[in-house]
């Protein structure tokens, strides 16, 4: 090409959650059954969307208006419905004009970072959910900025680390929280959220709160929404239907902007995103039409509660398999449907492996190994090859820690026991 096509930022784009599938496909083709623990798609893990919800969406398909474009910002009646829900929480107040729909939060996240000045940085949690960290890194042509979540303290954020980075890096304009968090399953405690709001107020920052798992909490936890705690600080809550309904294939999510009137630059960000949406015409319409009838249905809250009880029970089953293993740091989870398991310091050594019975699979795994490979990735490949369990290495979540992420999604309890029995056996064999 006459000129370079791709900028430095492109190096930051990676999504191991899906890339690992190519490896698992090779192992599957060689005859190993795969236990998919890599992706947060409840439908892939056999969740059934209730019939009453399917009836609502089927009826929408019979309406002619479903097939047209909609307002670039999102259907006004749906935005009004969502604004009222947020206002009912008793915190900051918004109107339908503060809400902007996207084709899933993936789209919202990509656009948000894309339009912020490259030198202006958003600091987010590490381990990091790759869509945020890759988007932030790619916009800045640099490695993503992160603050530490501490596995030795329930995965809570290291507030000293966050405060110091904000203090000494004047380029930081915003703080990202993912609450409940992917990949750790941590739910931010109220005191910590209040400290983050105070920090944002002190340094004139805005807060982004990814609340895609906002309603998914269990075993006594509750996630505070940004609207409840933000007071007068500018902030963006990101919400969607992918996990809650669950309807990830809808590609439907929205942002709620709080305190737009408090800062001109922040308001410009909203207007820029709206212009970008106008250029695109609009986001997927049908899921927007489905939101009010589904979420206002009396069966909805009950359904969410029942799902949370199920996830909470799985969290306990997983805990029973992993809590006594001496080689790992294990934290029970209280929100979202992931758990991040960390290898204890000093435990990873060269030459560790798992026994693989199938010689074809052994040679595939041998071909993957490189000298500079992260140790957790090596464990993940062995776990896949020897036990068929497909998880994601934590070093690929923008983290210096070594470990792996699992999900709490398996509907079939026998399979759940089998999967975590295999993980436990693999850990004991690899490190024992
Ligand atoms: C924290 C977080 N944010 C956003 C997304 C993307 O959501 P969507 O399906 O709306 O693009 C995910 C998907 O797993 C997620 O875990």
Image (cartoon, rainbow, N blue to C red):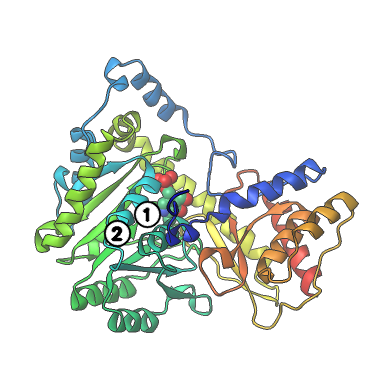
Query: Which element is circle 2 on?
Result: loop
**Is residue 195 shown left or right of residue 271?**
right
Q: Earlier in the sequence, mark 1 or mark 2?
A: 1
**Residue 370 shows in this picture:** yes
Report the number of discs: 2
Residue nearer the viewer, 282 or 315: 282
State the image coordinates of residue 415 (x, y, percent, origin top left).
70, 47
Reading the image, the residue beneath label 2 is 225
State the image coordinates of residue 30 (x, y, percent, origin top left).
82, 44
State the image coordinates of residue 272 (x, y, percent, origin top left).
20, 50
Kindly identify the residue that appears in the image at 25 percent across and 57 percent down.
236
Reading the image, the residue beneath label 1 is 214
**Residue 85 shows in this picture:** no
Residue nearer the viewer, 105 or 121: 121
Question: Tag on residue 70?
Answer: none
**Is residue 328 shown left or right of residue 368?**
left
Which residue appears farthest toward the front when viewing the image? 2
């Amino acid at each position: 090409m006459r000129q370079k096509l791709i900028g430095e930022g492109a190096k930051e784009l990676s999504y191991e959650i899906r890339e690992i599938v190519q490896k698992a496909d090779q192992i599957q083709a060689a005859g190993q059954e795969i236990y998919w623990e890599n992706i947060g798609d409840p439908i892939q893990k056999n969740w059934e969307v209730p019939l009453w919800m399917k009836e609502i969406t089927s009826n929408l398909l019979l309406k002619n208006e479903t097939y047209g474009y909609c307002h670039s910002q999102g259907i006004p009646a749906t935005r009004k419905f969502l604004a009222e829900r947020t206002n009912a929480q008793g915190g900051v107040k918004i109107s339908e004009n503060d809400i902007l729909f996207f084709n899933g939060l993936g789209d919202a996240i990509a656009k948000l970072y894309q339009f912020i000045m490259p030198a202006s940085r958003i600091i987010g949690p590490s381990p990091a959910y790759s869509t945020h960290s890759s988007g932030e890194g790619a916009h800045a042509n640099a490695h993503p900025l992160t603050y530490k979540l501490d596995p030795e303290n329930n995965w809570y954020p290291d507030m000293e680390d966050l405060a110091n980075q904000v203090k000494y890096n004047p380029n930081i304009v915003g703080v990202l929280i993912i609450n409940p968090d992917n990949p750790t399953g941590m739910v931010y405690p109220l005191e910590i959220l209040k400290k983050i709001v105070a920090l944002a107020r002190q340094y004139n920052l805005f807060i982004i709160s990814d609340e895609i798992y906002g309603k998914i909490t269990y075993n006594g936890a509750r996630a505070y929404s940004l609207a409840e705690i933000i007071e007068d600080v500018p902030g963006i809550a990101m919400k969607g239907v992918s996990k809650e309904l669950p309807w990830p294939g809808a590609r439907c999510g929205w942002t709620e902007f709080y305190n737009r009137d408090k800062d001109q630059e922040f308001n410009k960000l909203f207007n820029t995103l709206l212009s970008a949406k106008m250029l695109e015409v609009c986001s997927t319409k049908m899921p927007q039409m489905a939101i009010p009838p589904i979420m206002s249905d009396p069966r909805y809250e009950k359904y969410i509660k029942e799902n949370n009880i199920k996830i909470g029970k799985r969290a306990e089953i997983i805990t029973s398999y992993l809590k006594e293993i001496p080689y790992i740091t294990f934290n029970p989870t209280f929100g979202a449907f992931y758990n991040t398991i960390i290898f204890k310091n000093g435990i990873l050594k060269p030459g560790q492996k798992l026994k693989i019975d199938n010689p074809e699979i052994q040679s595939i795994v041998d071909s993957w190994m490189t000298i500079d490979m992260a140790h957790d990735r090596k464990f993940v490949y062995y776990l896949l090859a020897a036990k068929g369990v497909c998880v994601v290495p934590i070093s690929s979540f923008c983290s210096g820690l070594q470990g792996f992420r699992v999900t709490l999604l398996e509907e079939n309890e026998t399979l759940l026991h089998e999967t975590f029995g295999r993980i436990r056996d693999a850990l004991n064999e690899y490190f024992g």
